[in-house]
Image (cartoon, coloured by chain):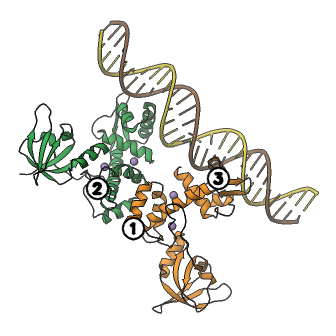
Chain colours: A green, B orange, C yellow, D brown
Amino acid sequence: MTPNKEDFIKAIHELGGQDTVVTNKELVRSLSISAASVTEMNNRLLKEELITHLPYQGVQLTEKGLLIANQLIRKHRIWEVFLAEKLGYDWNEVHADADLLEHASSDFLIERLNIFLGEPTFDPHGGVIPNKDGTIPEIHSTPLIECQTGDRFKIKEVDDQEDFLEYLLYKKVKLGKEYTISDIEPYDGPFTLEALNGERTLIGHKAAFKILVELLN
Amino acid sequence: MTPNKEDFIKAIHELGGQDTVVTNKELVRSLSISAASVTEMNNRLLKEELITHLPYQGVQLTEKGLLIANQLIRKHRIWEVFLAEKLGYDWNEVHADADLLEHASSDFLIERLNIFLGEPTFDPHGGVIPNKDGTIPEIHSTPLIECQTGDRFKIKEVDDQEDFLEYLLYKKVKLGKEYTISDIEPYDGPFTLEALNGERTLIGHKAAFKILVELLN
DNA sequence: AACTTTTTTTAGTCTACCCTAAAAATATTT
DNA sequence: AAATATTTTTAGGGTAGACTAAAAAAAGTT
Ligand SMILES: [Mn+2]
Ligand SMILES: [Mn+2]
Ligand SMILES: [Mn+2]
Ligand SMILES: [Mn+2]
């Protein structure tokens, strides 16, 4: 395994390669490499039986590939917790450094770090940390977009795009924070959220897809 | 800069390349790569003016090369402090993981980590941590081999070879621990050290070269 | 001084990534 | 159905880093 292969497998996973076919074009976009390089890497991973490949259609992770993806995500997210909680990174700052560290971490290191951090279940933006054996803890949460006016909820997870996290930082949206939906404008208009202290926040329609919540009674 | 180049420069530094010429053979031994690969890497570093090269004699670090070496050593040693103090690694366990992490650390990360660790001056075996600007704090310590019977001293630094550290762990020699030399056997015989609690430890002649101490009045 | 051994360099290969340009296959329009 | 556009693959190259085998240079021995 090399850092490039690991990141490539992770990209397939992020694009849904656990259950659906991921096209070369999506990988080109996601990894910012040429189409030819994607074909090449596909062939390498195919030889190692980490993916299956339907020519001109795309790739999918095998069991073996999925395990590698989940173990890498585990490393990534444990590092993110460290950077945020111990080194005081904001949640939009953790990604780049975790993306490097994940490839430079022995299993021994990750298990020690995990214990040092108190065996966290979630990363700083609510992503669940896969178990050591590659299995994923079951989590139940609802996209904000599916909620109704009047619903009360708690923020559970947010999309980890750097610019989106920055936007949420500015909007003061944090994991665990509770809101009530006081209004949803029609025609894909914004959500108006009211926090416990009465503070009101406008959240755009598209952003409501990227926020997962837990409905409270 | 790549991980391989960084480690190569660090190896030159460890072999004395700051002031003396380091031969290819020494680098072959130290990095476990072929002589041809050493010649190749020399040429690459030469082109970047990180080393000077006398054909068939060896290489030496330039100012530029020395700065890179010291900054890498800073990263390495700060990680070692983290692994030892926060993750509970024994001092003979820190090296391999720090050797990977040092190449996957942004300057931002290292400065945050440094602050988190309380801006340490020394790594777990007493190696001084270079400053951010690549300068080295001045340290005054004496090799144990130069001490006399009757001398009282404190352990300041030990060689960081993994097997030597394991030996010291077994001998219960730790940084900061105080001893008196109760005997030095002639003909390169062992040193007998007596700790404050009366406990006696035999230290081989060769080991006495690898232990640096601070003499106490 | 001549021979032998050691060390360094050169020459030729290999793998992992990356690229561009062209060809082939598939999808979309007209 | 044909033409056009998009996507994927192939062909051909490039760099970093590693190797072995052979040639060249330096050092050590007799
Ligand atoms: Mn990564
Ligand atoms: Mn993340
Ligand atoms: Mn290293
Ligand atoms: Mn060290």
Question: Compared to A100, does A115 lie above or below?
Answer: below
Cβ–Cβ under 8 Å for marks 1 and 3:
no
Residue underneath mark 1: B117
Categorize mark 1 by other alpha carbons within 10 Å: few (<14), some (14-19), many (20+).
some
Provide residue B140's location: percent of width, then percent of height.
Answer: 57, 77
Give me the residue at 31% from left, 49% from top: A92
- Using the image, tell me which numbered label, if any, was put on residue A131: 2
- Using the image, tell me which numbered label, if any, was put on residue B38: 3
Q: Residue A150's image quarter?
A: top left
Question: Compared to A137, does B157 lie above or below?
Answer: below
Tell me the chain of label 1: B
Distance in Å between CA atoms under marks 2 and 3: 42 Å
Element carrying mark 1: loop
Amino acid type assigned to the residue bearing label 2 in the image: Asn
**Sequence order check, earlier mark of 1 and 3:** 3
Distance in Å between CA atoms under marks 1 and 2: 28 Å
Say whether residue A159 is visible. no
Element carrying mark 2: loop
Provide residue A158's location: percent of width, then percent of height.
Answer: 23, 47
Cβ–Cβ under 8 Å for marks 1 and 2:
no
Q: Nearer the viewer, residue B85 or A13?
A: B85
Amino acid type assigned to the residue bearing label 3 in the image: Val
Q: Residue A109's image quarter?
A: bottom left
> Which callout, 2 or 3, points to the residue nearer the camera?
3
Element carrying mark 3: helix
Q: Nearer the viewer, residue D13 or A216?
A: A216
Tell me the chain of label 2: A
Say whether residue A145 is visible. yes
Amino acid type assigned to the residue bearing label 1 in the image: Leu
Determine whether, in the image, residue B23 is placed left or right of residue B30: right
Q: Nearer the viewer, residue A44 or B89?
A: B89
